[in-house]
């Protein structure tokens, strides 16, 4: 089975609220499902496809553990057909690999 790549993630850190928003820039209104105490997965209201994540108190969260949880959510979404299909994306893209350094840059331990 070929992997379906997600669009390049966009990161926005709200320092006041201590929340890191990771979105795939799809522009669809979304709802959130709690994954664990510090991670929420966002899904499109109309398509029910994965649109992003919210990391609550990312400075307190351990980046490798958060990335592991995100990868698990992405894997589950792939199996359920909840990954957005966007033309021109690399089907072998690795979210954790592309996001890890960006997360560490935005949220230093």
Image (tube, rainbow, N blue to C red):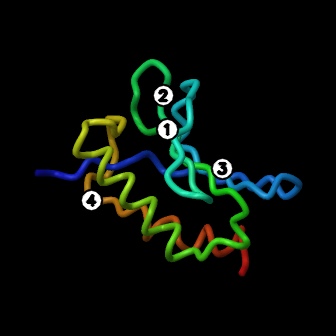
Residue ranking furthest to the right:
16
Mark 4 vs mark 3, CA separation in Å: 23 Å
| Disc 4 versus disc 3: nearer the observer | 3
Say whether disc 2 or disc 3 marks the residue closer to the N-terminus: 3
Q: Are marks 2 and 3 in contact (CB under 8 Å)?
A: no
Residue identifier under label 3? 21
Circles 2, 1 touching at the beta carbon (< 8 Å): yes
Disc 2 packing (10 Å; few <14; some 14–19; many ≥20): some
Residue 48 at x, y percent in the picture: 40, 27
Q: For the residue labelled by badge 2, is the local secondary structure a helix, a strand or a loop?
A: strand
Judging by the rendered image, the residue that carries numbered circle 1 is 51
Precedes in sequence: disc 2 or disc 4:
2
Question: Is tag 1's residue or tag 4's residue first in the polypeptide sequence?
Answer: 1
Q: CA distance from mark 2 to mark 1?
A: 6 Å
Check disc 4 and report the residue beneath it.
Answer: 92
Residue 100 vs residue 63, the one in the foreground = 63
Q: Would residue 96 appear left or right of 76 to someone viewing this image?
A: right
Label drawn at residue 44: 2
Q: How much space separates mark 3 and mark 1, taking CA atoms?
A: 11 Å
Q: Are marks 2 and 4 in contact (CB under 8 Å)?
A: no
Q: Earlier in the sequence, mark 2 or mark 1?
A: 2
């Amino acid at each position: 089975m070929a992997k379906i790549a997600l669009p390049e993630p966009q990161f926005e850190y709200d320092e006041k609220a201590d929340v890191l928003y990771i979105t795939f820039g799809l522009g669809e209104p979304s709802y959130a499902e709690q994954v664990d105490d510090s991670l929420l997965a966002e899904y499109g209201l109309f398509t029910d496809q994965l649109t992003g994540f919210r990391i609550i108190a990312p400075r307190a969260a351990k980046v490798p553990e958060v990335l592991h949880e995100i990868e698990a959510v992405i894997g589950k979404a792939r199996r359920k057909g909840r990954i957005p299909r966007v033309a021109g994306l690399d089907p072998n893209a690795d979210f954790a690999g592309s996001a890890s350094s960006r997360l560490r840059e935005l949220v230093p331990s």
